Image: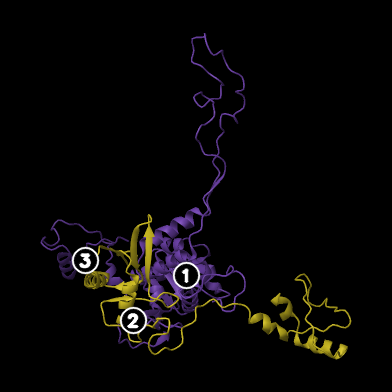
Amino acid sequence: MSACFTLRSKMMHRVLRCAFQLPGPSVIRLQPMCVAVGEHNPPCGTLETTEEYVFVERLIPPTRVPVPPRHDGPAPSGWAPPSDVPPSLPYMVRRSRMHNIPVYTDISHGNRRTTVVRRVEGDIWALDGAVRELLKRLTGTDRPTQVNEVTMSIRIKGHYDKEIKEWLMQKGF
Amino acid sequence: MLRISVMACSRGVAKRFMSSMSGESSLPSNLRLPSNLVDPSRTKRPPPPADSSLPIIRTCDSSVPTHLSPLLTWVESLAAQQGDPVGLAQLHPDVFAVPSRLDILHQVEVWQRSYKRISYANTKVRSEVRGGGRKPWRQKGSGRARVGSIRSPLWRGGGVSHGPRGPTSYYYMLPMKVRVMGLKVALSSKLAQDYLYVVESLDLPTPDPLYILDLLRQRHWGQSLLIVDACDELPENLLQATANLKTVNVIPAIGLNVHSMLKHEAVVLTLAAVRFLESKLLWHDERYTPLYPFKMPYSDLP
């Protein structure tokens, strides 16, 4: 459709306007794709214009996730942006494409609860040690963890997503 | 050319050998090394130092994350066979310094080989083999084994019971993000192994294929070369020179794929190709899931 409208040149549009001199709103006529340029014979009493195509173009959605606006501190929902200066730790946890902390819960077999921390970069074993310490402090028990060095993720037994998300956000990741 | 880890008989090389295999003596005295031995650590140019004097010709268009820094590579020129680099180029770390996921490379390579495969092998089942409708002899009393048809799979000339059946397609699609990750891992691996070269333009002085082969040999780029450009028309000299060469191939940047990168030892990208690849590959890191297929118009496709 867009190809049809771009084919109509501004010259032809002006010529048509002068030829037919119609008052009232201009009309867009939708042509089928098989009409070639040059065989253009609009019936009497119609006007063709391309200026209204702006309204179609602004409906076409974007593909990229927008960068969130500048926040000083946490938003009302609890979301907080990552700190501008990355924390000086041997590991780094990047945000997801929707700018959230990449900690997810998983359940298999109906009763096997795990928490996954994805998108880790740097020294993953240091992060593993820090997470184990945190959970030892919070729960009093040693939670088993599994470090996957290929996918750079840590899987923890039990649902601890809220605690780990808060802790990572407070660290500035 | 022979490349092995045991280098030529020189003192520096012997020291390197000793450091890698500690506890053992230096090279044995009756070791015979071939004369065409090549030491890769001495032939390839080391990566540019931070305080290099050459100008940075190309900076990254997209923003680099704060905890990472752009990579620097030499920008070379193909005008002279033994030329020096012309400048430096910045490469985005999320495309050219991705952790090496060999499992993803394997997946993408296997997918590239098999998604186009249609196997035409076909055999006839006992019902399809000509004949075999009548029962050869009566069920009981003849003394021979009981038989229902002469085309049973037990018989010579009979049908195949579990053979290949008709054209089978091995088509499947890996997720888009896995294929994109495969390209990023391949580019990062090539850069990490010093097999990726950035060139400012592909203008050759002659359309002679030997010029390119000599260039490869002198600069020790490798046995085979894949040249990637992102423009409407490739230079005539390059097309003529590579037309009959099997080891040097030119592809447009949209045609870049993991199989070609693994097949050719060295990969040469122009600055336009680097910009094209970075914009296309980085878009996948920040895009929404598609509302409708990406083949249809969106407002900001890369």
Q: Are marks 3 and 1 in contact (CB under 8 Å)?
A: no
Q: Amino acid at mark 1?
A: Ile
How far apart marks 3 and 1 lie (CA) works out to 57 Å
Residue A69, relative to residue A130: is it above or below? below
Question: Can the viewer see residue B81 in this picture?
Answer: no
Mark 1 lies on residue: B227
Indicate the colour of chain A: yellow
Chain that appears purple = B
User: Is A163 placed left or right of B139 in the picture?
Assistant: left
Viewer-closest of A142 and B145: A142
Residue B116, relative to residue A124: is it above or below? above
User: In the current view of this chain or complex, which residue is farthest to the right?
Assistant: A44
Mark 2 lies on residue: B67
Quarter holding residue A45? bottom right
How far apart marks 3 and 2 lie (CA) works out to 34 Å
Question: Which mark, residue B108?
Answer: none
Reading the chain from its start, which is encountered first: label 2 or label 1?
A: 2
Secondary structure state at the residue bearing disc 3: loop
Secondary structure state at the residue bearing disc 1: strand
Q: Position of residue A159 (x, y in %)?
A: 33, 66
Q: Chain of mark 3?
A: A
Q: Amino acid at mark 2?
A: His
Quadrant in the picture for the N terminus of chain B: bottom left
Q: Are marks 2 and 1 in contact (CB under 8 Å)?
A: no
Mark 3 lies on residue: A141
Q: Chain of mark 1?
A: B
